[in-house]
Amino acid sequence: MKDENEAGMNRTGMAMALREGRVQEGNAWKNVPASPGDERELERMRAAYEGESEPIGSVPSPASLKGLAKTALQMLEGHDPKAFIDRLGERLAFERSGIRLYELLIGKHRAAQSPTGEADLENLIRIRNQELAHFRLLWDSLEKLGADPTAETPAADHAGVKTMGLIQTLSDPRSTFYQGLDAILIAELADNEGWRMLVELAEGMGLKEMAAAFRQANAQEGMHLEQIRKWWEGLVREEAGLAEAITA
Ligand SMILES: [Fe+2]
Ligand SMILES: [Fe+2]
């Protein structure tokens, strides 16, 4: 069984070879190129690239304004549906990644190669299914607004890049169940903020039905976070040899 805290042959620290470490420290500054300027030069160069580059994609206009349901169109009048569509696209991408993250975590639980603490498969599968339901809710909401759910909006692209590290750590065969939970905790924190914002946006745009459905998804995200945090804390305490949380 894997244990990420097991003492092993870790040779990455300088304390492994003190004398060589000191020599290396002394060498660190020897080969620094003597070019003029300081780190601000890098910042200036990045700023130049930023000035020249295009934005990360664009939000497609609803297939046609005719595609917008009449009521939705009235509601959105005076607001910018594109900003809302971009946020919906972001959540859609993030929830899709969420499903993948849970599937990977379920796989780790089933493989039972590292401690799983109090986490149980039944609840993990339930949360995964709720993430899937959230994905479908977003898909339907985009369609109701006359938008194309298959379009990658800028925020959707951004969401995909952000979750890459989480997917990577969970799909790493060496990572433990705890490390998977730790990655999912980040996703759930973001989920909670994301849905909270969507509720606010839908409410602000007068889309009452949508806001109610989003509020329900947000409530489920709250429960996900609570559950994941509990399992995560339990495993940290177990590994550290600490008793149950005092303020349970
Ligand atoms: Fe979700
Ligand atoms: Fe969630």
Image: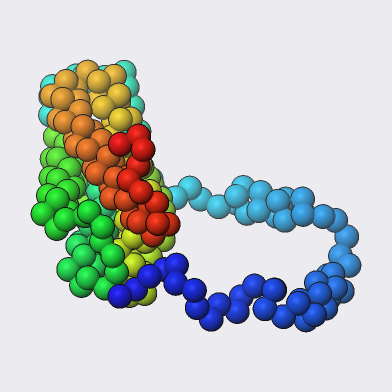
Count of numbered marks: 0
Q: Give the answer, above or below, for where 215 lies relative to 169.
A: above
Q: Give the answer, above or below, for where 109 lies relative to 76.
A: below
Q: Residue at x 32, y 45 (%)?
A: 244
Q: Position of residue 159 (x, y in %)?
A: 37, 50
With 206 as the anchor, is 163 left or right in this view?
A: right
Q: Position of residue 245 (x, y in %)?
A: 35, 42
Q: Residue at x 44, y 72 (%)?
A: 6
Q: How is the image coloured?
A: rainbow
Q: Give the answer, above or below, for where 78 lies relative to 63.
A: above
Task: Residue 169: tell me if it is visible.
Answer: yes
In the image shown, does 163 or 208 lie closer to the viewer? Answer: 163
Which quadrant: the C terminus? Answer: top left
In the image shown, does 182 or 84 lie closer to the viewer? Answer: 182
Q: Position of residue 8 (x, y in %)?
A: 50, 78
Q: Residue at x 28, y 41 (%)?
A: 225
Which quadrant: the N terminus? Answer: bottom left
- Which of the 4 image quarters holds residue 110? bottom left
With 24 as the anchor, is 101 left or right in this view?
A: left
With 186 as the anchor, is 128 left or right in this view?
A: left
With 139 as the anchor, is 86 left or right in this view?
A: right
Q: Give the answer, above or below, for where 69 lies relative to 86.
A: above
Task: Residue 68: tell me if it is visible.
Answer: no
Q: Position of residue 17 (x, y in %)?
A: 72, 80
- Which of the 4 image quarters holds residue 90? top left
Q: Residue at x 26, y 73 (%)?
A: 113
In the image shown, does 169 or 212 lie closer to the viewer? Answer: 169
